[in-house]
Image (cartoon, rainbow, N blue to C red):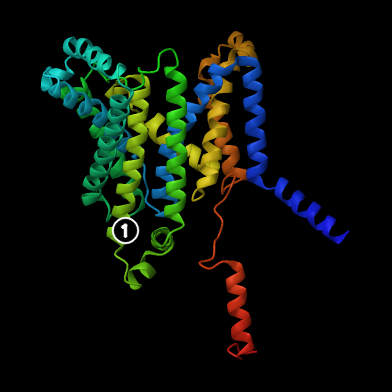
Amino acid sequence: MSDDKQIVSRLKGFLLRREVIITAVIVALLTFLLITRGVPMILTIFIDFAIFAIVTLSLNLEVGYTGISQFGRVLAVMAGAFGAGAIPGRVMAAIMGLPWGASYAEATVNFKLVPQLTAVLEKSWFLSIVFLIFCLLVAALCGAGIGWLTSRPAIRLKEAYLGISLLAFGDLLMWIGHNWEPLVGATTSVYIPDPFRFVPGNRFQVVVITVFVIAFLIYFFINTLTHSPFGRTLKMVRDNEISAAAAGKDVVKIRTRSLMIGSAIAAIGGALYVIYTGAATAIGFTRLTWTFWPWAFMMLGGIGSNLGVLLGVFLLTILRSMITIFRFQVFGFLIQWGIDPTWLEFTLMGAVIIVVVLFLPHGLVPEKVEPVLPADRVQKVITNMSSRGRFLT
């Protein structure tokens, strides 16, 4: 009987865990949307979740684990998007003997040239996969490079000064892309050869599955990294830089590495986004979408908690979609009072964030304090030392 009670107690404890409850809510909301809106809406939510999960996990690595005031997340996302839009297509065009220089990004040339490149990819799944991997590698290198470059003048700054510097760098890159045509077409867009066209009639489904798998691979990579000695070093720097420096850690170098890794991951998210949409437009990368929303996702899920970030992104993505879908049905009566329900997305999401900050200041799934050694080994050490009389009573 005692064993049965123990099993029931453990099961009850498991079901009452926050992450289990949030997962159940997510499944319920997805089921509701599947019944009312069908599979296309679920796939749209999945790909939005996957892209923003990649970006927000990279932000959590820098903010939650290293303590960097990263208010310029859009910078790395843009670096990846611009890299994927400007380099792989040019390389392919040069190999095929087509225009690949500054004229590649001209609107009158690019929209005729890219379909020719896509037609070549469409005939070979192997070439398409190689092109996709090349795009992601280029994006990661661009992200890591921009992370290192911006860290040089800014990494020694503290808190708000560092955050404002990174914010300014993000705006700088956006305006360069918006005004310098050879990069990504300036005020127009630069189109990207489609590596998913080899799947006839099922492109969207394949894109969703691919991005979803990449997002979870990145989650497992970051989770492994943050549980490694390097991850514990990041937490040391976050919690007390003076103690970390006294322990012989190069704080500037550690923060630079964190910024480079996080920027490379965020750049992969930016590359996947422009490959999914088919075009890179500089003015489309705003602080609201690529800095504010990732911060909101991270705060909702739990700063310093990878699982919390993942669940926070998923839940908030679903809520944003539901507000967009049902705002006129639920709040249509506000029109007669001169209130346009179109803008309720930002109002209601802001209210959700305020509620979370007030009642769950550490997020839905807060960061867990983890000992360096497992609990059973700690207990064994204490027992052995007690038996030898090492502890004073």
The reply to whether residue 224 is in sight is: yes
Count of marks overlaid on the render: 1
Up-down: is 6 above or below 315? below
Secondary element at tag 1: helix
Q: Position of residue 319 (x, y in %)?
A: 58, 27
Q: Position of residue 77 (x, y in %)?
A: 33, 34
The reply to whether residue 16 is in sight is: no
Residue at image coords 62%, 21%: 33
In the visual, does 324 lie left or right of 20?
A: left
User: Circle 1 sits on which residue?
Assistant: 254
Looking at this view, is 130 or 240 the one in front?
130
Give the residue furthest to the right.
1
Dot 1 amino acid type: Ile
Residue at image coords 27%, 16%: 118
Q: Position of residue 60 (x, y in %)?
A: 44, 46
Up-down: is 226 above or below 310? below
Question: Based on the displayed image, in which of its 4 quarters is residue 18 positioned?
Answer: top right
Q: Residues within 10 Å of mark 1 (few under 14, many from 20)?
A: some
Quadrant showing the N terminus: bottom right
Residue at image coords 34%, 36%: 268
Looking at this view, is 137 or 44 the one in front?
137
In the visual, does 161 lie left or right of 38?
A: left
Question: Based on the displayed image, in which of its 4 quarters is residue 93 positioned?
Answer: top left
Looking at this view, is 152 or 9 the one in front?
9
Up-down: is 150 above or below 32? below
Question: Based on the displayed image, in which of its 4 quarters is residue 357 positioned?
Answer: top right
In the visual, does 275 lie left or right of 91?
A: right
Quadrant showing the C terminus: bottom right
Q: Position of residue 323 (x, y in %)?
A: 57, 21
